[in-house]
Amino acid sequence: HISSHLTMTTKTNVLSLLALLALSLFYCTAALSSPHHRKQISTGRRMSSSLNSKASSPLDGQREKISSDRVFFIELGFGNDSHGQSSTKAAVRACRNAIEFNSIPSIKRLIPDGGYDALKLDVLLAIPPKYQEGLNLEEVSKVFPYGDVRFELQDGGMVAPSGIAIEKLGDVNDDMVVVCASVTVGH
């Protein structure tokens, strides 16, 4: 009886986690597909130069979005900060999740005008509105090893309860901050 009870409990826990993951992906997908509540921020960053933008102030003269005929692929990811309520930490994790399983060894042949240095990255981040203020795009841009990074922010992501606020981990409440990322790679 004990082993069958443990098996039932384990199955229930696994199913609960899968349901939460599916719900998170559903909300991330819905948020990323909505054109509402977006603001564009172009970092103007190249691999060799520094970032001069914060989420609160879009740069004038930002570059245009990558045109559809110059897109190689679009990667999706999501990240979470379970303790500390950091949208930056969640966005870094979302961007890493989007790009971490990819390699583009033929870029120099695909891009006639400069290979990796000519890459353009359009990064769309869906962030819960109450956590957008603290977003540090300079930190998020460090995820990308090359290319000209342009950010676009929109309301989205998710705030879910962690069930506990741990002051030593920086918690001010029990919110988990979930950020969704769409990374368009092109030239």
Image: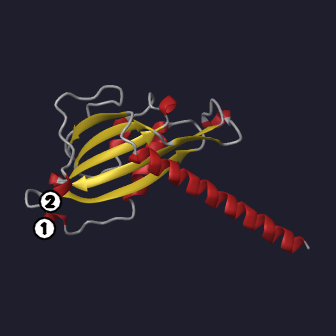
**Picture mark count:** 2
Q: Earlier in the sequence, mark 1 or mark 2?
A: 1
Q: Quadrant of residue 174?
A: top right
Vertical side of 64 occupied by 183: above or below = below
Residue 157 seen in the current view: yes
Of the pair 71 and 137, the residue shown nearer to us = 71
Q: Residue furthest top?
A: 57
Residue carrying label 2? 115
Q: CA distance from mark 1 to mark 2?
A: 7 Å
**Kind of residue at badge 2:** Gly
At mark 1, the secondary structure is helix
Question: Residue 28: where, in percent of width, then height?
Answer: 48, 48
Q: Residues within 10 Å of mark 1 (few under 14, many from 20)?
A: few
Q: Position of residue 50 (x, y in %)?
A: 24, 37
Give the quadrant of residue 160: top right
Q: Residue at x 46, y 48 (%)?
A: 30
Describe the element under mark 2 as helix, strand or loop. Answer: helix
From the viewer's perspective, tell me whether residue 159 is left or right of residue 167: left
Residue 93 visible in this rendered orientation of the protein: no
| x 51%, y 48%: residue | 27
Which residue is at 43% across, 54% downward?
77
Looking at the picture, tell me which residue is in the foreground, 177 or 153: 153
Residue under the point 25% across and 36% down:
42
Task: Give the numbered dot on residue 123.
Answer: none
Residue type (three-letter) at the residue carrying disc 1: Arg
Vertical placement of 79 versus 104: above or below?
Answer: above
Outermost residue on the left side: it is: 113
The quarter of the rendered structure image containing the N terminus is: bottom right
Q: Quadrant of the C terminus?
A: bottom left
Q: Position of residue 131 (x, y in %)?
A: 49, 32
Q: Which residue is mark 1?
A: 109
